[in-house]
Image (cartoon, rainbow, N blue to C red):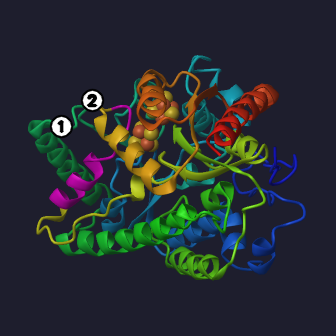
């Protein structure tokens, strides 16, 4: 099986969120070399960039608001003259400290976030003037209660029945309450005009990131799934990032890549978010002959597939409609996720689906039954479910399972030739 980067894994210093991962390939692809000093290098220093950006913003009197879920409309926070910062933890080193207070059998993303909290090791959490606590999965909800003992927090209640009209009415009312809270907490007016301006910025950012992701539809994509994952930021709406997205699109569009000899297996990754520092499974897939052409999770396409409708007069209603359509497994039912997977399958032409489940993430784990059924019975492609945490102890076993999956894919391709 062809290997894209040998066995080199990113060396991530998980103890310090300001240390960015090293480049994936020692040799460096020609695209990486040509982009030296450009967008790849810029987003390779994403945490450092965010740190400098947030420090400067605080010095200029802006506030920082922590979030942990894609249901929270960043636009509302931006309209309150504050920076929305993602606080999700991806460090394995934070799990031990977290388990002093939390059960071991809990999602590593929640434990890692909490570990940063008790160790005071995440500079963005330490800068946060307020944390928006979204009521998504049970583990996150209860962890927030412990965090709230020492940190200012606002609970944003997410209704769980996505298709009900009264659920939408409740969600609109929740967003109006969040707006009021931000106004009171920061003594600032959150006007419709400010929200609309923030919507325009966020729509622009979503469009750029979507355009970059859509390059993976090509038969010979100009970048790897791992490189694409680098093109994101913990703080949205930063003009410097938008310029770099634009540069990256122009650069990769101008590249002539020929992957016809690489015999890489096109993979659709689904399931839980892969936050900064927790990219191990993606690295294993791409270093064992896979090319992740599409990720539908919250660190992939899910939050950027749709924009906020700028023609709706009441911006709160516009935000509510866009964000409530996120197809997350915490919703019941979550049929839209299957529709999105069907659409992505048609557009990105993956040869298999790999579902990543963080250990003890019950909602994604139960829903994996439906994804497997969709892959095998409807789409007719192999499916692999990988349940793991942030520890590298099962990497060799995962690599073996990935190789076996790719052999199945190649065997099928051989039969149809
Ligand atoms: S997977 Fe669900 S709970 Fe997690 S960030 Fe995405 S929308 Fe929020
Ligand atoms: S991965 Fe699952 S368990 Fe973990 S925070 Fe997200 S929804 Fe909750």
Please tell me whether mark 1 sits on a helix, a strand or a loop: loop
Mark 2 CB in 8 Å range of ligand 1? no
Q: Is residue 57 magenta?
A: no
- Residue 149 visible to the viewer: no
The chief SS type of the magenta part is: helix
Q: Position of residue 305 (x, y in %)?
A: 38, 58
Q: Nearer the viewer, residue 376 or 273?
A: 376
Q: Nearer the viewer, residue 416 or 65?
A: 416
The answer to whether residue 71 is left or right of residue 175 is: right
Quadrant containing ligand 1: top left
Q: What residue lies at 18% left-to-right and 70% top-to-bottom? A: 192
Please name the residue that numbered disc 2 is placed on. 333
**Distance between the alpha carbons at the discs numbered 2 and 1:** 8 Å
Q: Is residue 317 magenta?
A: yes
Which stretch appears magenta?
316-330
Question: Residue 99: which numbered mark, if any?
Answer: none
Please name the residue that numbered disc 1 is placed on. 163
Graded by Cα atoms within 10 Å as few (under 14), some (14 to 19) or many (20 or more), the crowding at tag 1 reads some
The answer to whether residue 396 is left or right of residue 118 is: right
Q: Nearer the viewer, residue 307 or 101?
A: 307
Please tell me whether mark 2 sits on a helix, a strand or a loop: loop
Q: Nearer the viewer, residue 267 or 26?
A: 267
User: In the rendered image, which quarter contains the N terminus?
Assistant: top right
């Amino acid at each position: 099986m062809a290997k894209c980067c040998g066995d080199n894994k990113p060396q991530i210093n998980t103890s310090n969120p300001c240390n960015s991962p090293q480049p994936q390939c020692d040799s460096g692809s020609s695209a990486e070399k040509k982009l030296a000093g450009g967008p790849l290098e810029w987003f390779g220093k994403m945490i450092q960039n965010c740190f400098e950006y947030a420090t400067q913003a605080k010095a200029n009197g802006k506030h920082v608001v922590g979030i942990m879920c894609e249901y929270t409309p960043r636009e509302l926070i931006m309209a309150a003259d504050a920076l929305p910062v993602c606080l999700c933890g991806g460090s394995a080193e934070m799990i031990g400290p977290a388990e002093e207070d939390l059960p071991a059998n809990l999602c590593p993303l929640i434990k890692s976030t909490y570990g940063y909290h008790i160790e005071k090791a995440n500079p963005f959490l330490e800068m946060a003037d307020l944390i928006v606590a979204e009521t998504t999965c049970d583990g996150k909800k209860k962890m927030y209660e412990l965090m709230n003992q020492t940190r200012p927090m606002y609970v944003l209640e997410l209704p769980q029945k996505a298709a009900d009209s009264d659920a939408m009415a409740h969600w609109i009312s929740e967003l109006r309450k969040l707006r009021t809270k931000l106004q009171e907490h920061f003594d600032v007016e959150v006007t419709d005009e400010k929200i609309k301006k923030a919507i325009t910025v966020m729509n622009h950012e979503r469009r750029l990131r979507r355009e970059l992701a859509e390059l993976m539809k090509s038969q010979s994509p100009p970048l790897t799934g791992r490189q694409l994952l680098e093109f994101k930021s913990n703080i949205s709406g930063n003009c410097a990032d938008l310029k770099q997205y634009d540069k990256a699109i122009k650069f990769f569009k101008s590249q002539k890549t020929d992957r016809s000899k690489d015999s890489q297996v096109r993979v659709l990754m689904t399931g839980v978010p892969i936050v900064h520092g927790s990219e191990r499974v993606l690295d294993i897939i791409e270093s064992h002959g896979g090319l992740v052409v599409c990720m539908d999770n919250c660190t992939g396409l899910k939050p950027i597939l749709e924009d906020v409708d700028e023609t709706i007069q009441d911006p709160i209603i516009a935000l509510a409609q866009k964000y409530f359509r996120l197809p997350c497994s915490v919703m019941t039912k979550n049929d839209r996720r299957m529709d999105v997977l069907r659409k992505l399958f048609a557009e990105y032409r993956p040869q298999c689906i790999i579902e990543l489940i963080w250990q003890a993430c019950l909602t994604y784990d139960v829903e994996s039954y439906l994804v497997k059924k969709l892959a095998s019975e409807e789409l007719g492609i192999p499916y692999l479910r990988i349940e793991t945490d942030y520890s590298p102890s099962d990497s060799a076993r995962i690599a073996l399972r990935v190789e076996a999956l790719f052999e199945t894919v190649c065997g099928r391709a051989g039969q149809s030739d």
